[in-house]
Image: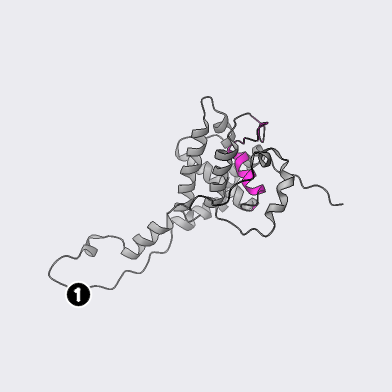
Amino acid sequence: MPPAVSLPDPDTLDREAAALYESATWQRIVTDWTTREPLAAPPDEPATGTESWRDLLTVPVDRLVADALHALPPPPPAERLPGRLGAVLPDRLHAWRRVGRPELRPSVHLGYARLVLTEWGWQNAPYKLRDVRGARCVCGALLAAHRLGHGSATTMNESAAWIMAELRSRGWQDLIGPWNRAPGRTAADAVALLDATIHRAAHAGR
């Protein structure tokens, strides 16, 4: 019988996300979307004696349209989570859900993590994956989405790194767990953080 696979916990994910955020790999991810090759400029239009609206633009129209479409956040997940019983079951019992699942962008994985928080609940007890009702912390929601088959472990780690990027943009210099457990933190704060991170990752094409 093969040995049981050790599943990561929220604090492990938190540390791995911080390491990814500080790594050269993350810098390449960020560089890839901030230094995309510019689109070729459209051919000059014949002079008409009046200034064309296109002449007022400093970026080609094709690029503006492509960037606008690229930055749209993914639609909310259509698939629902298992019910309240699914929230409290051991995670290993959800392993079959991963079979045959396609890979996802981090922004889509984050959408499923958001669904975990809104359907199963949010909690901020330290060092716990979930409470007795099955509510998760922010990192626990990422783990739950992954274990339900929504995104690989690599995608999950990148999703957490995007959360780190969002927190850094707000001036938070600690890990995700301490943010989640900060006095006065609410479920609405956690959901809003994921919403902002989904937009940030989607804008980067991730």
> Quick check: can you spot residue 179?
yes
Q: Residues within 10 Å of mark 1 (few under 14, many from 20)?
A: few
Tell me residue 59's x, y (percent).
Answer: 31, 61
The quadrant in which residue 136 appears is top right
Which region shows up in magenta?
126-152
- Picture coordinates of residue 33, whole percent (x, y): 46, 56
Tell me, yes or no, whether the highlighted magenta stretch contains residue 176: no
Amino acid at circle 1: Pro
Q: Is residue 148 magenta?
A: yes
Q: In this view of the protein, which residue sits in the foreground, 55 or 27?
A: 55
Specify the color scheme: one colour
Q: Residue 118 occupies which quadrant of the picture?
A: top right
Q: Nearer the viewer, residue 55 or 24?
A: 55
Q: Which residue is mark 1?
A: 46
Q: Residue furthest right?
A: 1
Q: Residue at horizontal 45%, vertical 40%?
A: 169
